[in-house]
Image (cartoon, rainbow, N blue to C red):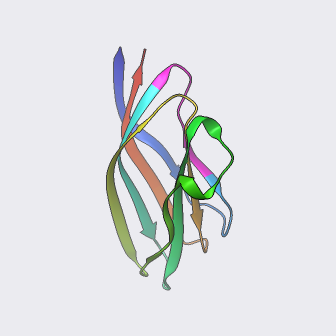
Amino acid sequence: MATTYKVLGQSAPAATTATTLYTVPALTQTIVSTLTICNRGASGATYRVAVRPDGASLADQHYLAYDTTIEPNNTIALTLGMTLDAGDIITIYSSNTSLSFTAFGSEIVA
């Protein structure tokens, strides 16, 4: 099994739109070590982060963070150690267009 350490996904999503940040490829397992949320704007914002197992439709039980506030010109680093299987999806959401999301981790290919 080969392990690759990498930036798994980056996005500056449209406001109020659930957006895919990362989908685990087929025949792969992933460990998401850190997820950062950066507010580039001059006003506060809120964000959401969800993990959808096997690409399930977004539902309440998938949220890790929901309408969590981030102050202006600030960055939050969530050190999670999330373990994901093939087909799992990280979905993000921002209350405005000033947030940037980055997921760092490793992919393990069978």
Residue at the front extreme, as displayed: 61
Q: Is residue 67 visible?
A: yes
Residue at the bottom extreme, as displayed: 43
Give the residue drawn at x 56%, y 22%.
26
Q: Is residue 8 left or right of residue 14?
A: left
Q: Is residue 99 visible?
A: no
- Closer to the camera, 56 or 48? 56
Q: Is residue 71 above or below residue 23?
A: below
Q: Which residues are magenta?
A: 20-28
Give the quadrant of residue 84.
top left
Say whether residue 30 is magenta.
Answer: no
- In the rendering, at what x and y percent does residue 27 appear? 51, 19
Give the residue drawn at x 55%, y 72%.
98
Give the residue drawn at x 56%, y 39%.
53
Quarter of the image that includes the C terminus: top left
Give the residue drawn at x 48%, y 30%.
85
